[in-house]
Structures are given as structure tokens and as C-alpha cells.
């Protein structure tokens, strides 16, 4: 029986934390760094598994525990022999823990905030909280134009804020679907409103049924707007949940769905705080139960865009060097370079297919919107790379398919976007092997514009 292992085959001569390696799993190897496409419900949306394996050339796929638990149910997936066999996929697989849904259905519900925020968003959020605590007759001084001060009340300020598109929670009527306690998380189904309860033990049992080669300990993903006091509370809870996850994983043994032993990753949390990230990396990296420790580590939680690289650096400097590191839910082009430069081995994100379904395509010069009128008569190929499935079609044809609402439009665009990002990371890997990482980074990012 093949077992999980990780080997580093080369360390970057330029970036001390960057490395090239191989993750060995029972169902094949993953050459790292690697981008892992997301098949949320055991399907890459709009793409046949056979076409995915043939045209994208990805080393692995990741599915979502929360969604497969709700539909079709983990027991049905188990009877198939795991989600990979159910979707007729033959390579290595990941599942997440469901922890991100604690965030998206809880702290993020109705706020319009993602895992990544900008510092100005945090400042605006703090300003909003301060204003809400003031009397409505409070007078605010603010420079609007011509370097002149104007005194306005809070109602005018709110209009000014909305005009400038500062995203804050305006949906007070929407309630969180999540309740977090020490034992676990109570949540309501997004399908029928029924109540469910996830504990670390429950997450492990579900993920054993799903049968992925690599899966994650149950964690709490916090909002980038959470203060440090709450980040500490959530961090300590995540560590306790990690211990319970590891204990139950050991107790369960091999996955009954696949008959294989799975690899369990812990999830490092701590928000934007370097000291908390360092603490989390050390606690989880040293956690050991009866001689068993975590097989790898996920970097989870929320960040500010500006602080991402230093958070990754301090985290990975304090994690065991000989174990793989996965950046959860991150897939922007520049983030891939910064992540790899700071020690990340694998990434996952829904962005490539989500963007594709809305007509947004990656190119070396940045994303394009195929709905733009200029593409109606653009007879150049969708992709210049002849190994890409979309190369055989013109932009004019794809523009026609999207405007006509033909389903195949999403298929072509998704295969293109997945091919683009998977092969970009493969090229980054090669640049490390050839000691030209920074040269390649400069050439790609100097040309790519969002």
C-alpha cells in the first residue's frame, strides 16, 4: 500500500523559503509548487473529469466537505469508494474541513467581505463602528474638495461613504447561520434551513468517508475585521480542535471508503497578527499524539493584502521544513508568486472557474472580459498556447457562445483558465529549478495587469 510522504528536491538559490518538491500519495504524486483546482461538489463546474485530466494536466483536485456532507451526503460518497471514484477521477485528492463555511455563513454573512481585505477596508470598518456608537447628532469634520473643511452630520457622511463604494454591512436584517461553541459549530443548511452540528470529530468522520488523500483538521476561519482579542480566542479554540481532530483521525485509522491511510493537515490561524501566526505555527508544528503528528499544514484564516507576504514568511519560518504547506483559498496571479517565494507548496481556489463562468479569461496581459464588444470580431485564438484546449476556438466564437448563453461557453473558458493557472505554477516551479525565479516573477507580473 502506498503511503503519504513529502520530499524536497531543490531549495531556491534566490528566495530562502521557496522550494521544489514532490508529495507522494496513495493515488499518485503532486509535483510542487502546484495549483490545485477546486471541485466543490465532486465536480469541476462545467468540465468533464476526463477533459479535466486530459487538457488541464493538474496533479490533484480539492472537494468541499461542507457541500458534500449536505449533498449527496457523505455516506453515499463513501459507498462509491470516495469522492474521486464517484467523479471518475484517478489522481490525488484533497478535502477541506468545512471551517471556511464557519466564516462565510457566520462572520461574513451579509457583510460582503472575503478572506482578503485591504488596510483601508479595516480603517473604514473601524470608523463605521465608532460612528455607530456616537449620537446621531454628532458633527464630523471632513475634507471633501478644494482643501476646505465642511461640517456634516452622520447621515450625510453615510451618503458620502456609499458614493465612494466603501463596503460595509448594510444588511442588518440578515442573521448569521452559524453558532460557534467550544464543542463545535451549529449551522443551518443553505438548502432547507435544517440544523446541523459540526465537531472536530464529525469533520474527521465525514472526511474519512469522502476518502481524500489529504484533508484538514477542523478550524475556525476568522474575519479580517475581527479584533485581536477574538483572534486569540479563535486561535486557541482552533488549536484545541486540531488536537481533537488528530486524536480522532488516529482512532479512525484507514478510510473505509478507500482502504487507504489519509494524510491530515493542521490549519494555522492568527489573522493579521505576526505573533499569533508564529505561535500557531509552533503549537501545531510540535503537536504530537502517541508519536503521530500532522502530515502537513494549511495556512488559513484572513489577511490584509498588504500584510500577506510577511504573514506567510513568519508562519513558514516556524513550521517544520520537511512537511508540505498549503495556502487555502488563494489564487490571484501575484499571490501565487508571493506565496511560493515565502514557502508555500500548494494552493487551491475557485477563482479560475468562477471567473470563467462569467466570461473573464486569463491572458499573459491580464484578464479580459469576453463580453466586450471588440471580441465579436476577434478571430484570434482564445489562447496562444497550442496545448490549451481553448486554442482551437476563436475569441469571436467564444463571445458568441456567451452572448447566446450556450453552456459550452463555460466549459471552454473554464478549461482555458484552469490550464493557464496550473501551467503558470508549473512554470514557476521550473524557474526555481533553473535559479531564475525572480527574473520570471518580474517578467510575468510586469506584463500581467488585473
Image (cartoon, rainbow, N blue to C red):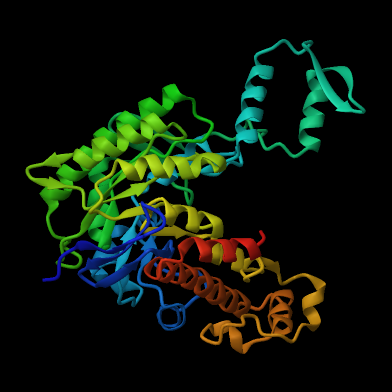
Q: Is residue 32 above or below residue 403?
A: above
List x then y, in percent, for residue 188.
44, 42
List x then y, in percent, for residue 247.
15, 43
Q: Which of 267 and 40 is in front in this view?
A: 267
Quadrant housing residue 187: top left
Q: Quadrant of the N terminus?
A: bottom left
List x then y, in percent, for residue 416.
56, 76
Q: Is residue 400 visible?
A: yes
Which residue occupies 60% across, 63% down?
A: 355
Quadrant housing residue 220: top left
Which residue occupies 63% across, 77% down?
A: 409
Would residue 367 appear left or right of 221 to someone viewing this image?
right
Q: Nearer the viewer, residue 179 or 439?
A: 439
Q: Is residue 241 visible?
A: no
Q: In which quarter of the image is the C terminus?
A: bottom right
Which residue occupies 65% across, 65% down?
A: 447
Which residue occupies 38% across, 39% down?
A: 314
Would residue 106 appear left or right of 181 to someone viewing this image?
right
Amino acid at each position: 500500500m502506498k503511503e503519504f510522504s513529502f520530499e524536497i528536491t531543490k531549495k531556491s538559490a534566490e528566495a530562502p523559503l521557496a522550494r521544489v518538491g514532490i508529495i507522494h500519495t496513495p493515488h499518485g504524486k503532486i509535483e510542487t509548487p502546484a495549483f490545485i483546482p477546486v471541485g466543490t461538489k465532486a465536480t469541476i463546474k462545467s468540465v468533464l473529469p476526463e477533459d479535466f485530466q486530459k487538457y488541464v494536466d493538474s496533479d490533484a483536485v480539492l472537494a468541499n466537505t461542507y457541500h458534500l456532507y449536505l449533498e449527496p451526503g457523505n455516506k453515499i460518497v463513501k459507498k462509491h469508494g470516495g469522492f474521486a471514484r464517484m467523479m471518475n477521477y484517478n489522481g490525488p485528492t484533497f478535502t477541506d474541513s468545512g471551517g471556511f463555511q464557519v466564516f462565510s455563513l457566520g462572520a461574513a454573512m451579509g457583510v460582503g467581505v472575503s478572506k482578503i481585505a485591504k488596510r483601508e477596508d479595516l480603517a473604514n470598518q473601524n470608523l463605521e463602528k465608532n460612528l455607530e456608537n456616537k449620537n446621531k447628532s454628532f458633527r464630523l469634520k471632513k475634507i471633501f474638495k478644494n482643501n476646505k473643511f465642511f461640517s456634516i452630520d452622520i447621515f450625510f457622511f453615510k451618503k458620502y461613504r456609499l458614493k465612494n463604494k466603501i463596503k460595509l454591512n448594510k444588511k442588518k436584517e440578515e442573521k448569521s447561520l452559524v453558532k460557534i461553541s467550544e464543542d463545535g459549530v451549529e449551522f443551518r443548511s443553505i438548502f432547507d434551513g435544517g440544523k446541523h452540528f459540526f465537531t472536530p470529530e464529525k469533520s474527521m468522520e465525514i472526511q474519512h468517508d469522502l476518502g481524500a488523500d489529504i484533508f484538514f483538521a477542523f478550524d475556525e476561519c476568522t474575519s479580517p475585521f475581527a479584533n485581536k482579542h477574538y483572534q486569540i480566542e479563535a486561535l486557541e479554540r482552533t488549536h484545541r480542535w486540531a488536537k481533537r481532530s488528530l486524536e480522532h483521525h488516529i482512532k479512525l485509522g484507514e478510510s473505509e471508503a478507500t482502504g487507504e491511510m489519509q494524510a491530515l493537515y493542521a490549519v494555522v490561524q492568527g489573522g493579521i497578527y505576526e505573533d499569533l501566526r508564529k505561535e500557531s505555527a509552533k503549537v501545531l508544528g510540535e503537536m504530537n499524539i502517541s508519536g503521530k503528528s500532522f502530515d502537513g499544514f494549511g495556512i488559513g484564516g484572513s489577511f490584509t493584502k498588504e500584510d500577506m507576504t510577511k504573514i506567510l514568511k513568519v508562519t513558514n519560518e516556524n513550521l517544520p521544513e520537511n512537511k508540505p504547506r498549503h495556502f487555502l483559498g488563494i489564487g490571484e496571479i501575484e499571490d501565487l508568486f508571493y506565496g511560493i517565494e515565502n514557502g508555500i507548496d500548494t494552493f487551491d481556489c475557485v477563482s479560475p472557474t468562477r471567473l470563467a463562468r462569467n466570461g473573464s479569461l486569463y491572458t499573459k496581459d491580464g484578464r479580459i472580459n469576453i463580453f466586450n464588444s471588440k471580441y465579436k470580431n476577434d478571430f484570434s485564438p482564445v489562447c496562444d498556447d497550442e496545448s490549451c484546449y481553448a486554442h482551437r476556438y476563436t475569441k469571436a466564437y467564444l463571445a458568441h457562445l456567451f452572448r447566446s448563453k450556450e453552456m459550452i461557453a463555460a466549459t471552454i473558458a473554464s478549461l482555458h483558465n484552469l490550464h493557464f493557472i496550473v501551467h503558470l505554477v508549473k512554470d514557476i516551479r521550473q524557474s526555481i529549478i533553473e535559479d531564475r525565479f525572480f527574473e520570471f516573477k518580474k517578467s510575468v507580473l510586469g506584463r500581467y495587469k488585473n
